[in-house]
Image (tube, rainbow, N blue to C red):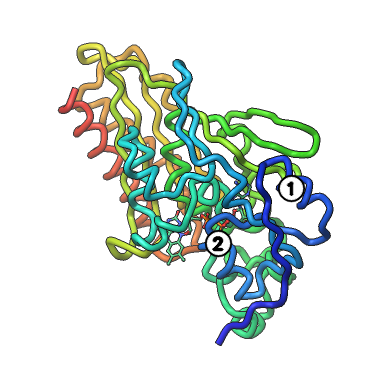
Amino acid sequence: MLRMQGFTVQVARSPEEAVALYAAAPDAAFIAGGTDLLPEIKLGLSQPRTLVAIGTALPATVQDEGADLVLGAGLRLEQVAALGLPALSAAAAHVGSPQVRAAGTLGGNVMLSPRCMYYNQTPAWRASLGGCMRAEGPLCRVTGSAARCVATQCSDTLPALLVLGARLRLCSPAGTREVPLADLLRYDGMRPMDLAPGELLTHVILPRPAPGTRCRVDKLAARGSIDFPMLVTAVLLRLRGAVVEELRIAVGAVSPQPRLLPVDAWVGRPLHEAAVGELADLAWQKVRPVASVEGDVAWRREVARVTVRRALESLRAEA
Ligand SMILES: Cc1cc2nc3c(=O)[nH]c(=O)nc-3n(C[C@H](O)[C@H](O)[C@H](O)COP(=O)(O)OP(=O)(O)OC[C@H]3O[C@@H](n4cnc5c(N)ncnc54)[C@H](O)[C@@H]3O)c2cc1C
């Protein structure tokens, strides 16, 4: 049986109170649905002495602000799945299982701790290999070096949020700031987002897509439910006739950093079959899966090519 270490729980009633409680407590952690944090505590990967419960502090609202749709970070994934939003609702519906989606929040999914087969293990398992750099050192067991941790960011929603151009609203004792998600993500399994300690995600802001925009997300996982992804692709496409007016392709669950592919050169060009093939090849060139989660890396790379091609073909056919 995995036992959790002792901790105190402090319940916050507002974002401001949550960040103040966090700042006042040594070794604190925010807990929303707890579906990821509690397993980490059980495995000794996170050892907070204070849990700041943010379930009642975070907004769980959907506000239409004209140019933007503002989603509260406290929305449960099952609620996000039911909103019928392009890309994001399908991505939320792919997470785990109905139980996980009923408890897990949008904010927790955005802030998900990167995963690794050498990290998400019991202390005894990790000790048998001499430890994992991120948990207790000294080396990353995937790369055999101490240069950096390459745990994979397996959040299902991040690629969808990237193609939608999402911004994050963050609250801290210093005030509130709003930053494009793409500017926060880092290629570092130990610090996957460029955030100050104790910054709280309160809202996810989605710019309204232009009319005629179509999106698709695909998830590769060992089973149809429960499993974390080995690859997520998200594609956003807007055509005028056959010509590309807007195109974004994001790939996640292959490395510490979900990324947008450099596809600007295809804007203004017709999306004929040859262009679809070129974009699928680009995905293959740019996607370099890391062996920190299950799934052969060469196979995941090849599947990236296939899912990008299929997504573009189906979006083109819809248009
Ligand atoms: C069986 C199982 C299967 C799963 N499958 C998937 C899957 O397929 N895909 C997937 O993406 N995830 C999966 N998960 C992981 C997890 O359930 C989801 O990512 C969920 O969205 C996490 O949300 P939460 O509210 O429970 O986060 P929590 O566990 O409460 O928090 C997760 C982390 O985010 C931080 N955090 C939470 N909210 C905020 C906030 N508002 N501001 C700042 N920091 C915050 C916490 O401090 C913690 O570090 C699975 C989990 C389980 C147990």
Q: CA distance from mark 1 to mark 2?
A: 17 Å
Above or below 226: residue 243: above
Bin the neighbour count of mark 1 within 10 Å (Cα to Cα): few under 14, some 14-19, many 20 and up: some
Res. 52 mark:
none
Is residue 232 in sight in this rendering? yes
Mark 2 lies within 8 Å of ligand 1 (Cβ measured): yes
Say which element carries label 2: loop
Q: Quadrant of residue 4?
A: bottom right
Q: Name the residue located 63 percent from the left edge and 48 percent from the top edge.
A: 192
> x, y (%) of residue 279?
33, 31
Residue under label 2: 34
Front residue of this view, candidates 71 and 287 = 71
Disc 1 marks which amino acid?
Gly
If the image is split into quadrants, where does the C terminus sit? top left
Say which element carries label 1: loop
Residue under label 1: 198
Above or below 165: residue 259: below
> x, y (%) of residue 203?
56, 35
Q: Name the residue located 63 percent from the left edge and 37 percent from the top edge.
A: 184
